[in-house]
């Protein structure tokens, strides 16, 4: 990795040190507000919408976003934009407008708890365990990527990089719980942008501006196809190797909605909001910066494609995952380099903190309290939450090395999403809109949907099924999980008893509870610029408009 080594000096290290001290300081300050388990796990449901909105999008700005999307920009070109404009914004708006009233109004503490109340305890346990596993796997991705970057850029040994990254995240989550994570995520959002914007600007200047970049991409191995999003998707002869059906249904619907609407690591930020209106606006506020983040992720990937000779190797310093670090090495002067390194470190810490804070909540409330130690004092569960935080980080260190086998970590994470999130979304969406769906239908749709996606994935690894790319397999795996879960939900419901309506109030459409009625939902939305429907419509329209120049 010596080819990635940065020429950092005292100023760069000083900037990084100031950031570390600030992050820990936020943790110590947030600790003073922790009086009970609700404060630790849900910030006492007291956060304003602008804070939770920025935390919502920042929690997603981890290794997946910064390293993974820049790698995809270099590997697949502008087709990576689908992950934002089809694969994120519509689902974020749907979460705010349609699903948050049920999450927030039912006063559940987690997504698995919602499934317990809507279906039954087996459904709850399966989802809680699978979510906990997924979170430590994804936390491992963030931690491993952080360690590799620190090793490659600064020359730190891998073990030291892992220990430092894990210790800092562990410290501020253990101290201040979700509040510490959220306030640090807001800080990290701006630090990440401060690190990525100079890379984009200096890189564009180097290649002759946007028009110069276009010309150079057309002359690259990807060619002109890398500059379009939909025009080459009638078949699979495009950089992504996917047609428009896989993109719209697999990515834009199943993977996207499955991730953004049921992933508790994201939903938890909205549950910490101070009221129903703030909770609904949380993901929608996050959708607006999400529209423009490709400027500092996908475009640098294209710049790396045309400026870094040999990018795309299977191993070493020229893997796609190193697109951003390679640009930092080649483009940035000292001082600015320190900001960029700090921004990169912030991105990994934000992603890992989201995974760890989601994990400790689900482990404590949905596994430990529900099945192992019931009816203990609140202080007991607060201690369990802090211990679970330590355990989650330790397991994350172990799972970090699984990610080492992937040339592009985005492919690994999309595979995880197709396994865990896609069947969960199908179970959710049917159960939320169809009150007849039975408790056992919820359980079997979740399990068999997961097995359908796992079968396709294992078949792909064993060359039983053929796809053009890892990502195409993820799209179809997600689709298979969704369809299987929906079919199973219908069939099992026909042969098993449903819950009485009295137990479903506030959990399904058409059966409003005392805190999910229309009057409660719209009570905070009378000021037009706070109306989630209006804000969400604007975000979706902007996503469509942004596609037009790159069709």
Image (cartoon, grey):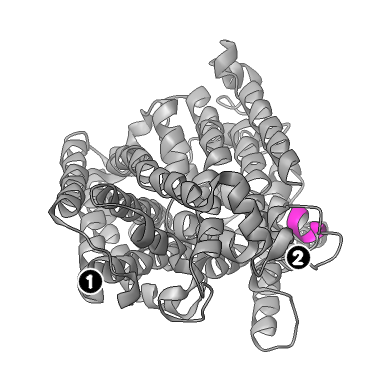
> What x and y, as percent, mark residue 503?
62, 40
Q: Is 84 positioned to the left or the right of 139 in the image?
A: right
Mark 2 and mark 1: span between their CA atoms?
Answer: 38 Å
Closer to the camera in the image, 43 or 2: 2
Region of the chain picked out in magenta, as a range: 244-248
Sequence-earlier tag: 2 or 1: 1
> What x and y, as percent, mark residue 523?
56, 14
Residue 238 is labelled as 2
> What x and y, as percent, mark residue 338?
25, 51
The residue indicated by pointer 1 is 155
Q: Main secondary structure of the magenta part?
A: helix
The answer to whether residue 302 shows anywhere in this view is yes
Give the quarter of the image for residue 36: top left
Q: Residue at 40% across / 75% down in the picture?
A: 317
Closer to the camera in the image, 179 or 514: 179
The answer to whether residue 119 shows anywhere in this view is no
């Amino acid at each position: 990795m010596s080819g990635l080594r940065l020429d950092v000096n005292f100023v760069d290290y000083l900037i990084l040190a100031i950031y570390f001290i600030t992050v820990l300081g936020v943790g110590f300050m947030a600790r003073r507000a922790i009086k009970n388990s609700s404060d630790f796990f849900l910030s006492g449901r007291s956060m304003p919408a602008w804070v939770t909105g920025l935390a919502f999008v920042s929690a997603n700005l981890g290794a997946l976003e910064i390293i993974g999307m820049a790698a995809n920009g270099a590997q697949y070109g502008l087709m990576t934009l689908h992950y934002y404009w089809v694969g994120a914004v519509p689902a974020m708006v749907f979460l705010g407008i349609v699903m948050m009233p049920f999450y927030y109004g039912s006063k559940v503490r987690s997504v698995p708890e919602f499934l317990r109340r809507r279906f039954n305890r087996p459904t709850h346990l399966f989802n809680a365990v699978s979510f906990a596993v997924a979170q430590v796997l994804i936390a491992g991705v963030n931690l491993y990527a952080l360690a590799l970057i620190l090793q490659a850029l600064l020359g730190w040994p891998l073990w030291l990089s892992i220990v430092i990254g894990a210790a800092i995240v562990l410290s501020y989550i253990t101290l201040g719980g979700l509040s510490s994570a959220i306030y640090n995520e807001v800080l990290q959002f701006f630090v990440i942008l401060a690190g990525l914007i100079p890379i984009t600007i200096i890189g564009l200047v180097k290649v002759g501006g946007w028009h110069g970049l276009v010309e150079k991409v057309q002359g690259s191995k990807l060619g002109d196809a890398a500059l379009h999003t939909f025009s080459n998707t009638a078949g699979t002869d495009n950089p992504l190797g996917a047609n428009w059906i896989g993109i719209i249904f697999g990515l834009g619907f199943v993977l996207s909605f499955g991730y953004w609407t049921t992933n508790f690591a994201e939903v938890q930020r909205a549950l910490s909001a101070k009221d129903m209106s703030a909770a609904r606006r949380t993901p929608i506020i996050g959708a607006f910066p999400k529209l423009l983040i490709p400027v500092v992720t996908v475009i640098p990937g294209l710049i790396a494609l045309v400026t870094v000779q040999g990018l795309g190797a299977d191993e070493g310093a020229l893997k796609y995952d190193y697109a951003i670090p390679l640009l930092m090495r080649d483009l940035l002067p000292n001082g600015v380099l320190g900001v960029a390194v700090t921004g990169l470190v912030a991105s990994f810490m934000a992603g890992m903190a989201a995974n760890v804070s989601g994990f400790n909540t689900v482990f404590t409330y949905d596994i430990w309290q529900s099945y192992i130690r019931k009816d203990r004092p609140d202080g007991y569960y607060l201690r369990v939450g802090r211990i679970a935080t330590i355990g989650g980080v330790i397991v994350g260190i172990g799972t970090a090395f699984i990610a080492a086998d992937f040339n592009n970590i985005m492919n690994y994470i999309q595979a995880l999403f197709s396994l865990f999130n896609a069947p969960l979304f199908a179970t959710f969406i049917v159960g939320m809109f169809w009150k007849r769906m039975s408790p056992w239908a919820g359980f079997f749709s979740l399990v068999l949907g997961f097995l359908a996606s796992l079968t396709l994935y294992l078949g792909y690894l064993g060359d039983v099924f053929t796809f053009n790319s890892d990502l195409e397999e993820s799209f179809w795996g997600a689709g298979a999980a969704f369809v299987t879960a929906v079919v199973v939900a219908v069939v099992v419901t026909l042969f098993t008893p449903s819950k009485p309506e009295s137990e479903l109030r506030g959990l399904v459409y058409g059966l409003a509870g005392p805190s999910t009625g229309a009057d409660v939902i719209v009570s905070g939305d009378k000021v037009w610029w706070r109306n989630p429907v209006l804000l969400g419509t604007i975000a979706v329209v902007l996503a469509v408009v942004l596609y037009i120049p790159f069709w």
